[in-house]
Image (spheres, rainbow, N blue to C red):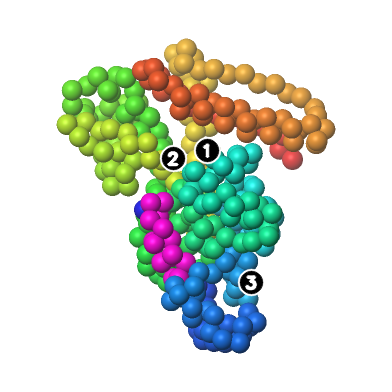
Amino acid sequence: MLQNRNDELETVVRELLRSLRGKRSQLALSRRLGYSFNQVGKWESGHTKIRWDEFVRLSGLCKSPLDQALTNHYKYKGTAANCDAIIKNLIGSERVSTIAKKTGFSRHSLAKWLKKSAFPTVPEMFRLLLLYRGGDDHLVSFIGSLVSSIDELPSIAPEYRQRVKQIELSYQHPWLAAVKDCLSLQSYQRLEKHREGFVSRCLRISTAEEKMALDFLTEVGVLTFSKGKYQVTGKKLMFQENILDKEKDIEGNFRLREYWWSQALNHLISRPAWSSLTFAFQTFTVSESAFRKIRALSVQYFSDVTKIIEEDEEPRTLLRVMNLCFFDPSGL
């Protein structure tokens, strides 16, 4: 796990630099960067650590999509050169003293980075990304998106491929992420041993699909099997973004939405299911600026709901799905 090993972060950075350099010689690339000596060789050997500003310049020369990768994986819409803005985007309003305790970086260094009077090294920037946004999942995906082949990054290639598999299976089986929720129900927790068919009845899937899901979620660490039952570990599936193909991501997300809206429609037209259905709608006309505020509010609403769910310490007795949608009824 990158999150717990600074030396592994440094290994990944060296592999990344070699991959970006490609067939160029170390000296040739060093000269392109303005050095009269083999600075790239020092970075790749680990003799010296490359700073973030140097990495930005190198990425630009090697045509690596650094700006786009920061946008895709960390929702940062500025340029990679502004490391102070990236850090501020990550930490929000958190105090420098708090960040220092969390990261192990000195307050002096953090203050200089935020003022852009100094730059973190790439391993230091990656550690900030790890601790403040998405952990290993996002960082492995982010780094993998900077190179043409994940085989050139052997230290993270297995994790990257596992994440690809998670995404592909989540798109093929849109109900996959809900399996762990079924196992969090009080009715399952009260069972002495796992009962085949429990999940399939909750989600209306086949027992073969249930077995596939349980095996896979155990393999990737979302579940463990102990004392005859499955336990939820707290690790989440990574399926919100496809780390290889943006068009495939669009199609995959469409399948997710189609599946859960079809499930909602089945409840709408099934009178016996109405007791578990909360439904409301409102039509309205609105200005574009006001609609942007409404959409921002809906994002905050989902965030608030997630917080309530995560902080719920009472027995989980209900399994529910929440959908929210804005659309133009004219279809335009």
Please state which of the two labelled residues, at mark 2 or mark 1, is closer to the viewer: 2
* 102 within the magenta span: no
User: Label 2: few (<14), some or many (≥20) within 10 Å?
Assistant: some
Q: How many marks?
A: 3
* 10 within the magenta span: yes
Instruction: Name the kind of residue labelled 3 in the image.
Output: Arg
Q: What residue is pinned by disc 3?
A: 57
Instruction: Name the kind of residue labelled 1 in the image.
Output: Glu
| Quadrant for the C terminus in the image | top right
Q: Name which residue lies at 79% across and 31% down.
A: 290
Secondary element under disc 2, as helix, strand or loop, is loop
- The mark nearer the N terminus, 1 or 3, is 3
| Residue found at the far front of this picture | 108
Residue span colored magenta: 2-15
Secondary element under disc 1, as helix, strand or loop, is helix
Query: Can residue 86 be seen here?
Result: no
Query: Can residue 21 be seen here?
Result: yes
Query: In the displayed structure, would residue 70 be above or below residue 193?
Result: below
- Decide: marks 3, 2 in contact (CB < 8 A)? no
Q: What residue is pinned by disc 1?
A: 258
Q: Name which residue lies at 39% across and 62% down.
A: 7
